[in-house]
Amino acid sequence: MHITLETKPFAALETDALVSYVFDESDPIQGRISEIDTAAGGFLKKLAKSGEFSGKPLETTLLHAVAGLKAVRLLLLGAGKREKFDNAALRKLAGVATRYLKTRSVHNFAFVVRENDATEDFAQAIVEGAIAADFESDKYKTDKKNDKFIDSLAIAGYSDAERAAGEKGLARGRIIGESQSFARDLINEPSNKLTPKILAEKAEAMAKQAGLAVEILDERKIADLKMGALLSVSQGGPEPPRMIVVTYTPADPKPGAPVIGLVGKAVTFDTGGISIKPADGMEKMKYDMAGGATMLGVMRALATLKPNVKVICVVPATENMPGGTAQKPGDIQTAMSGKTIEVLNTDAEGRLILADGVHYAKQLGATHLVDAATLTGAIVVALASINVGVFSGADQTWTDKLLASAKAVGEKMWQLPMDDEYREFIKGTVADIQNIGSGKGGGSITGAWFIREFAGDTPWIHLDIAGTAWNDDAKPWLAKGPTGVALRTLVHLAMSY
């Protein structure tokens, strides 16, 4: 999609569709919408009085051949209450416009920001929303509708004085949006097209193209480093594991800044192992590598955005298969840290590979950790598909910083408790710890506590994205399939330094 910033008067824009938004208030025809109404000879006021549109969230009203506009169509979107409007709402509206117009074979449109909204952050939000909405999960379809695409988008409503800020936001939004699409494309790949080895190859190619340092540890190196937890998950199938390490080092590091370690779970297919999953819905377990893909997407963005903080990305990649050599419930495994683990359920495998990933990130010099994983079904019970579950070690300052980033970029996250009593649920009887809780309930918390055992005293955050990494149904602003959730938050977190 070709995206530009336009300072021409909106009425003079020659485009397939002019898009703007109205607020849910007693008189929705105000400000810039009033200017459009004046150009149209009061037509919009008549429609508003008739109830044709009201400004309620995500409402769409498409008008053709509006007098006074050179645009072929005018699309008005409901923005909801003005006091609740922010960059997250604008991002969603840009996505709604993109998907709505695509289905009608519109190939280019101009998105006009309202008065006082011509800012750097809002330009970024529009671009991110449009690129995210343009992503489709139909890569392997042979009967694609080739006329359903957006070729170009112009962001309008900016003055010449506001152009520099708008251009900066546009550029940043493109980097983040395209990096999110990179992650979503990886997540969407079927497991026969994305084995751990292929994921490592794609990560290596991305890193080299972006100018990042990269190292891929094969099964021999993983064994040499005594990553017994990762190896235990991989031993059930023929596909060897990989440990992917991608590093961004700033040219001018900020004094006193942390070394951020990003660790992402990448189980390229999860059958559950010997503790096998039900057949119904198992096909979606191709996305059990969403955490790893997201972390790789973050690194792709940071390579261009260049924060003044070092970031080390560690992605343990494996399949979890129920072959004759698979680990069995009751097996004892020794992690890279030396801690022993009683495996009570082989389907609680994500925390096993993260144990070695987190420990290795610390060995590589990470001083502050964030891991992301499609870890537990329990988080879906707790938070549904609305919020990412956030779990923290003892350093609340680090967690507050991440939550502030999530709020700034409009990603919903909710912190859950990590009381010491939950640690007792994973206390081992024949090993140091067990990989599932012995108590009833609290499955997402005990899963987080397991990973915390390997983070130790290092400031650490766990993001359980099991409920938010995949859309089971298409949204007006996003296609069915992978979401790339948490990428924008983690990019903002790194850039905050």
Image (cartoon, rainbow, N blue to C red):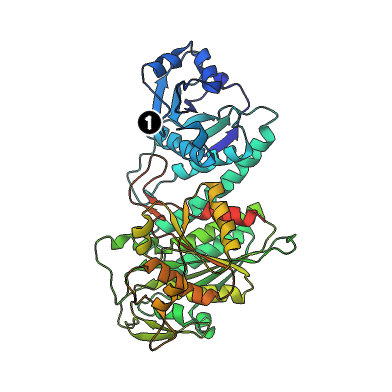
Q: Is residue 402 above or below residue 147?
A: below
Instruction: Give the image quarter of residue 6.
Output: top right
Q: Nearer the viewer, residue 381 or 162?
A: 381
Q: Quadrant of the C terminus?
A: bottom right
Q: Nearer the viewer, residue 218 or 60?
A: 60
Residue of label 1 = 104
Helix, strand or loop at mark 1: loop
Question: How far across and how far down the image is residue 413, in percent?
Answer: 47, 54
Seen at 44% across and 29% down, the residue is 77
- Mark 1 is surrounded, within 10 Å at the Cα level, by few (under 14), some (14 to 19) or many (20 or more) other residues, namely few
Tell me the kind of residue under disc 1: Arg
Q: Is residue 395 left or right of residue 497?
A: left
Asked whether residue 241 is in view, the answer is: no
Q: Is residue 372 above or below residue 242?
A: above
Residue situated furthest bottom in the rendering? 430
Q: Is residue 185 above or below residue 151?
A: below
Question: How far across and how far down the image is residue 211, in percent?
Answer: 64, 60
Residue situated furthest top in the rendering? 41
Asked whether residue 160 is in view, the answer is: yes
Seen at 49% across and 13% down, the residue is 40
Question: How far across and how far down the image is residue 81, in percent?
Answer: 47, 32
Q: Nearer the viewer, residue 428 or 228?
A: 428
